[in-house]
Image (cartoon, rainbow, N blue to C red):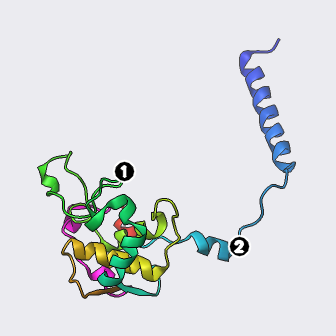
Amino acid sequence: MSTPKTLFAVALVLSFGGLAFAQSQSPNLGKPITESDVKTWDIAILPDGTNLPAGSGSSAQGAKVYAERCMVCHAEGGKGGIMPGAGPLVGGAPLTNGIDTAKTIANYYAYATTVFDYIRRAMPYNAPRSLADDDVYALTAYILSLNKLIGENDVMDAKTLPQVKMPNRDNFIMPYPDRI
């Protein structure tokens, strides 16, 4: 007579045996990914500027790109509010005013490189990753300039962008600093 433990053991062995069989009968979907395929999507920019691309942009250049590609959602001067979810890019009370304080680039972001990274990967909303790197540098310079974090004539590139000190930088704690 079989015990419940014996039946369980037999079922377990049959399950894993069936799993091995199922894995060996692959439907051959997909294709191997190449190093160049990975590079296309490996676009993360680190706080210290690691992985920033070549290129540069000024606030004046960014103002032109902003007018063409960003103003429709974020309003003139980055005031926000035209489209749902397109909050203000400029200003903002200190976050010490409470959890409901609107988070903007000036009062929330810890690193200017994060601004670049977000614009590059997610904007414009209707066509993410469609901006040239020079345009992303220019937009980043424009937004930082609107927030009075850099001068109007400052040029942002892979060397200057990581040097911008954001007001909220010291209020973030890196969860895994040894991984950077």
Label disc, if present, on residue 85 of the rendered structure: 1
Q: Residue 118: which quarter of the image?
A: bottom left
Residue 48 in sight: no
Does residue 59 sit above or below 91 in this rendering? below
Q: CA distance from mark 2 to mark 1?
A: 36 Å
Q: Is residue 71 rendered magenta in the image? A: no
Tell me what residue is drawn at x 29 percent, y 72 percent.
Answer: 143
Could you tell me the amino acid type at mark 1? Answer: Gly
- Label 2, residues with CA under 10 Å away: few <14, some 14-19, many ≥20: few
* Main SS class of the magenta portion in the image: loop
Coordinates of residue 112 in the picture (x, y in percent) = 31, 73
Label disc, if present, on residue 34 of the rendered structure: 2
Tell me what residue is drawn at x 23 percent, y 68 percent.
Answer: 169
Does residue 165 sit above or below 174 in this rendering? below
Q: Which residues are magenta?
A: 157-175
Tell me the quarter of the image containing the C terminus: bottom left
Report the side of 153 relative to 68 (left or right).
Answer: left
Could you tell me the amino acid type at mark 2? Answer: Thr
Furthest residue toward left: 97
Residue 99 in sight: yes
